[in-house]
Amino acid sequence: MKRLAIAAIGVVSLIASSTLLAQANVRVRGTIGEVGADALKVRSRDGRDIELRLAPDLQVSVPKKAGAADFKPGSYIGVTSVRDAGGRLVAKRVHALGPQVPQMHGAWDSIPGSTMTNANLVASARVAGGSEITLKYKDGEQKILVTPETEYYTFGPGSRDDLKPGETIFAGARVDGEGRFMAQRVVVSKDGVKPPQ
């Protein structure tokens, strides 16, 4: 009976682990090597070869360089920032966000030691060194310095035709129970402008 109970616990744990794996989400950044009818072969930043399956209703977007004037109070934005020597958050990149992207503030991996803040821009004020923007999200608020070196991006609609060997991509992929990567949305470089995420 005891062995049966242990076996049952093992099966439940295995199912739970498989369910968690099936729900895993990962960020894929890399360069397209090959383009298939329903998948991309991508060389990731860390040198892995990934087959990224494309959803039938895949959404493709392309990044465009923008400026501070494109982001006004009320804009929903993502800000990649790093802390300066004094501990202040300094924006490296600011990009537009779609409403489907969840609000957040936390560690990010596009730049070493960076954080990402997905939030509503509520105010901007001139300060020494640039402007201080105030961002509000569901769990709090952040004040971040934007400087003349901060890069700004918006996005335009793309298509599968933009997915070409040599272009770089960013995708939030879902990993199924067998370790396969599936993307619903892909941001792909165009005209030399790479995804800022």
Image (cartoon, rainbow, N blue to C red):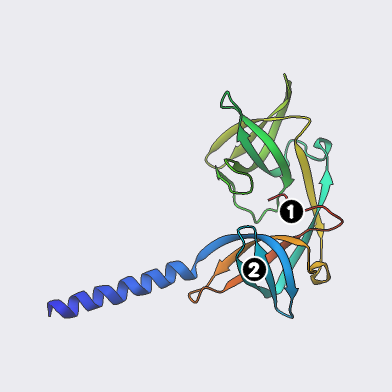
Q: Which residue matches tag 1?
A: 195
Residue 141's quadrant in the figure?
top right
Number of residues whose C-alpha sits closer than 10 Å to that of mark 1, classed few (under 14), some (14–19) or many (20 or more): many
| Labels 1 and 2: the sequence-earlier one | 2
In the image, which is nearer the foreground, mark 1 or mark 2?
A: 1
Residue drawn at x 77%, y 33% is 149
Q: Residue furthest top?
A: 128
Q: Nearer the viewer, residue 68 or 29?
A: 29
CA gap, disc 1 to disc 2? Answer: 15 Å
Residue drawn at x 73%, y 70% is 33
Judged from the image, the secondary structure of the residue bearing numbered disc 2 is: strand
Q: Nearer the viewer, residue 180 or 134?
A: 180
**What amino acid does circle 1 point to?**
Pro
Q: Is residue 103 left or right of residue 168?
A: left
**What amino acid does circle 2 point to?**
Ala
Q: Which residue matches tag 2?
A: 183
**Pointer 1 and pointer 2: residues touching (CB < 8 Å)?**
no
Q: Nearer the viewer, residue 82 or 24?
A: 82
Residue drawn at x 62%, y 70% is 50
